[in-house]
Image (tube, rainbow, N blue to C red):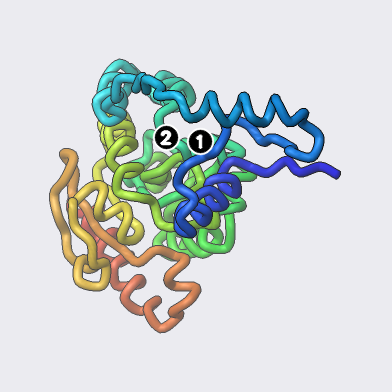
Amino acid sequence: MDLAIDHHTARVLLEWQVELGATEAVLDAPLNRYEAPEKQVQDKALSKAQPATLVLAPEVDAVQVARQAARGAKDLVGLRAALETFDYCELKLGAKKLVFGDGNPEGRVMIIGEAPGRDEDSQGRPFVGRAGQLLDRMLGSINMGRSTQLSKDSVYITNVLPWRPPQNRDPKPEEIAMLTPFLERHVEIVAPDVLVLMGNISCQAVLGRRGISRLRGHWFEALGSPVLPMFHPAFLLRRPAAKREAWADLLSLKAKLETAV
């Protein structure tokens, strides 16, 4: 029988045992005491009783490593390569694919979502599930889209996190912190006329604020661009009544682009 489990399941099981009070292992490896000779059992138990010196690896500042890696990226190809070699985020261990970006980098609008879901993790592209299909229809209502040929009407899409969190949980603050330098460099390279932040996580990463119901409908400045927070399409699928506010935000976006130089 195959007893192999994935990284995230193993971690959940370990955390459950810690909550029960099992905070210290008796041996370094499992031992079948019915098969092991009695002397071997005694020797292993005695060896565990001897004092040991614990050598800790030096702590690594993952955020600083991310900043250095992001600064070294000259273009989107280099930035993607920097993310692919960044090994300090545990989300990478459980994800199938890196979800980097989609659409036209020459477009005037850059949309920043929160994190990949199951469909995005499978395809390696942001916003391809039900929420992504709704986003495409929303953009189409103002004659814009990720596949639009003219750059003035096209958009570029990415996420705060390039890897899917397990069970689609919210990203942890430390995960956002270590991946924000890559996001900031992403925006710097694309240099959009307008940033659209979809949902609370992207607002937290870019504006340092949450509360999308209060933030949406208002314009801000961040990362060198005008910024418009909007409801995430996944939220609109759960709360169809909020589509009225989303339509108002889309009209505000269109008016901003028409008046921008």
- In the displayed image of the protein, which residue is found farthest to the bottom? 241
Q: Name the residue under label 1.
A: 92
- Name the side, left or right, on which 25 lies relative to 55: right
Residue at 27 percent across and 32 percent down: it is: 181
**SS under mark 1:** helix
- On the image, the x and y values in percent for residue 122 come to 64, 44
- Per the rendering, the mark at residue 89 is 2
Question: Label 2 neighbourhood size at 10 Å, few (<14), some (14-19), many (20+)?
Answer: some
Q: Can residue 147 be seen in this view?
A: no
Q: Is residue 12 visible?
A: yes
Residue at 68 percent across and 44 percent down: it is: 5
Residue at 16 percent across and 39 percent down: it is: 224
Residue type highlighted by circle 2: Cys
- Tell whether label 1 touches label 2 (CB within 8 Å): yes
Placement of 207 over or under 29, stated as above or below = below
What whole-number distance in Å separates the C-alpha atoms at marks 2 and 1?
6 Å
